[in-house]
Amino acid sequence: MASNFLSNFNIGKLNVFANPAKMFFPKRMVGIDVGTASIKVVEISRWGQGKTLENYAEIKSESLYKEPFRNAEKGSYLLSNYFVSRAVRAVLDEARIRTKAVVFSIPDFSTFCTSFDLPPMNQSELQDAVYYNASQYIPLPITETTLDWKLIGGTPGDKQSSLKIFLVAIPNQVIQDYQKVAQMAGVELYAVEAEALGLVRSLVKENKDCKCLVDIGVQSTTINIIDKKDLKKSYSFDFAGGQLTYSIASALGMGHMEAESVKNKEGLTSSKEEISKTLYLLIDPLIIEIKKVLSDFYQQEGKEVSTVYLTGGTSLLPGLREYISEVLKKKVEIPNCFSDLLYPPILGETLEKMAPSFSVAAGVALGGLET
Ligand SMILES: Nc1ncnc2c1ncn2[C@@H]1O[C@H](COP(=O)(O)OP(=O)(O)OP(=O)(O)O)[C@@H](O)[C@H]1O
Ligand SMILES: [Mg+2]
């Protein structure tokens, strides 16, 4: 199984193709992000250079099961492939999506992203050198992992130029899980892709300067550094958006639903000191983490990050964007993953509100259409 994948992966594109021979130039693609609390799907079609948002939908785990769809402690899913595949089928049916070709995003905690330097060498030597060196940087046996990589610095063939490699490694077991889910849900797995790469594709539109992209979900947060359009660093840590709700619920003696609603409506701007204080206490460590990533990057590369992008559902916490901007003294934006797609103008406002939760699904769908 492993060698099958290794021979099929698509070098330099950084997504692992499961089935490259079957659909060569897909015109429609569905991106599927199995998140902790919900599964998000985005269907995009392509006509020449134009791309149209055909459909999007979300199904929350609490509407089907008592457990979240995935759990970092267990590495992959908390729920079985069977339950996840049923939920995928349900959301596709509900949204009347008939397109079979899908790309699944792989959660950050199941992916290893790293970058490393290689000495000057020719293009023909590069692939073997990456494989040979990769084992030093990933904590899993190379035979149980699918690798993909991209050259992000230096020029092969130039004797003066050392080469910088960005490497993505996905355990084969994780890919096999997604294959099973796809098969049971009755769809065709076109590719799988690390979620950080999907995020960069759907959110980073300008090919200039360095950006920091922070995705705050329910269970984990990733902090990514992007130089021009290349992902240079990707860290994931366990700042959990879901914790904000629990803390409000216990500080104010509220039920989960009420705490969730207060958090989403009032957030850091709440006039009740107990609420804002509880949230600031949790948000400050997140900002310290972002600061550390920015300063490490500056020390390693001598480059200053110009803008921070926030995404993931928790990026909508009222007052969060302004607060991070004030502390970091940087421009902070919440980019819209749908902004380059065609869609009926009447949907504009709704899509803007939903967009942060769909960034990963939109990005991996776009990736499937690029190849
Ligand atoms: N207005 C809002 N203010 C604050 N938080 C919000 C708001 N709207 C949604 N959220 C939070 O966003 C989270 C869901 O975000 P998202 O869909 O990105 O998570 P996920 O992808 O399922 O999680 P993960 O990536 O950790 O697996 C929930 O914790 C929800 O409470
Ligand atoms: Mg997510």
Image (cartoon, grey):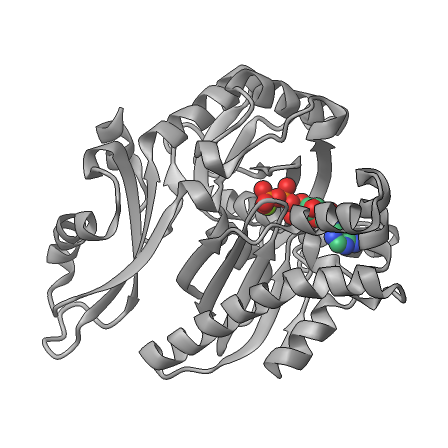
Query: Which percent across, then down, holds residue 107?
Result: 49, 42
Identify the residue shown where x is 72% and y is 31%. 59
Closer-to-camera residue (126/225): 225
Which quadrant of the figure has residue 142? Answer: top left
Query: Which percent across, then down, holds residue 230?
Result: 42, 65
In this rendering, the answer to whether 118 lies above or below 181 is: below
Total number of numbered discs in the rendering: 0
Q: Is residue 259 left or right of residue 1?
A: right
In this orientation, does residue 137 appear?
Answer: yes
Closer-to-camera residue (46/147): 147
Query: Which percent across, then down, holds residue 106?
Result: 47, 40
Q: Quadrant of the N terminus?
A: top left
Identify the residue shown where x is 80% and y is 53%. 263
Which quadrant of the figure has residue 300? Answer: bottom left
Identify the residue shown where x is 57% and y is 19%. 185
In this rendering, the answer to whether 123 lies above or below 227 is: above
In this orientation, does residue 45 appear?
Answer: no
Q: Is residue 231 left or right of residue 30?
A: left
Closer-to-camera residue (79/174): 79
In this rendering, the answer to whether 21 lies above or below 326 is: above
Query: Which percent across, then down, holds residue 118?
Result: 16, 65
